[in-house]
């Protein structure tokens, strides 16, 4: 995004996921702030809702995938989005190992 926006909890934004962080969150940038996005993988463009705002980072939850990652694989667990027990299930095996 070119123009800075006022960031607050509950704001829906469009993000491009660049990489993975420890714990399985996607990493993006919003207003030059690192943004950790739950249920997102590198290569995706998502609509996400800001869930936490800190002085040095943001947290968000993916609401909708606008553009899918080439590394995406369909999840096999119906509880994947809510549980957290199978963090990289939506990422192909070779990229799981690299993470």
Image (cartoon, rainbow, N blue to C red):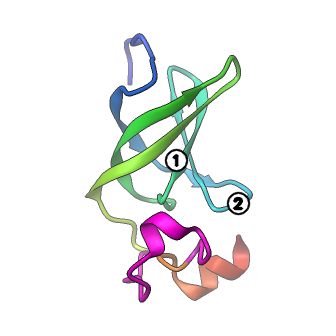
Q: Quadrant of residue 69?
A: bottom left
Can you say whether 59 is above or below 26 in the image? above
Q: Give 52 or 90, whichever is nearer the viewer.
A: 52
Q: Main secondary structure of the magenta part?
A: loop
Can you say whether 61 is above or below 33 in the image? below
Residue 73 on image: x %, y %: 41, 82
Q: Quadrant of residue 14?
A: top left
| Local secondary structure at mark 1 | strand
Q: Is residue 77 magenta?
A: yes
Can you say whether 90 is above or below 61 in the image? below
Q: How many marks?
A: 2
| Local secondary structure at mark 2 | loop
Residue 28 on image: x %, y %: 53, 41
Residue 55 on image: x %, y %: 69, 17
Asked whether the residues under the numbered discs 2 and 1 touch, taking CB atoms below 8 Å apart as contact, a structural biologist would say no
Using the image, tell me which numbered label, if any, was put on residue 48. Answer: none
Earlier residue among tags 2 and 1: 2
Residue at image mark 1 = 37
Residue at image coords 62%, 75%: 85
Q: Which portion, as a residue range, is magenta?
A: 71-88
Crowd around label 1: few <14 · some 14–19 · many ≥20 (10 Å) = many
Judge from the rendering whether residue 71 lies leftward or rightward of residue 27; answer left or right: left
Residue at image coords 44%, 59%: 43
Quadrant location of the N terminus in the rendered image: top left
Q: CA distance from mark 2 to mark 1?
A: 11 Å
Residue at image coords 47%, 58%: 40
Judge from the rendering whether residue 67 lies leftward or rightward of residue 25; answer left or right: left
Q: Quadrant of residue 95?
A: bottom right
Using the image, tell me which numbered label, if any, was put on residue 23. Answer: 2
Can you say whether 18 is above or below 88 in the image? above
């Amino acid at each position: 995004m070119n123009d800075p926006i006022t960031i607050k909890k509950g704001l829906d934004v469009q993000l491009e996921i660049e990489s993975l962080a420890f714990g399985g969150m996607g990493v993006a940038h919003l207003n030059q702030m690192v943004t950790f996005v739950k249920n997102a993988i590198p290569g995706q463009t998502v609509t996400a809702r800001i869930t936490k705002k800190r002085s040095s980072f943001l947290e968000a939850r993916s609401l909708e995938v606008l553009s899918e990652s080439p590394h995406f694989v369909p999840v096999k667990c119906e509880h994947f989005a809510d549980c957290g027990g199978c963090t990289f299930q939506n990422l192909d095996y070779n990229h799981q190992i690299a993470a």
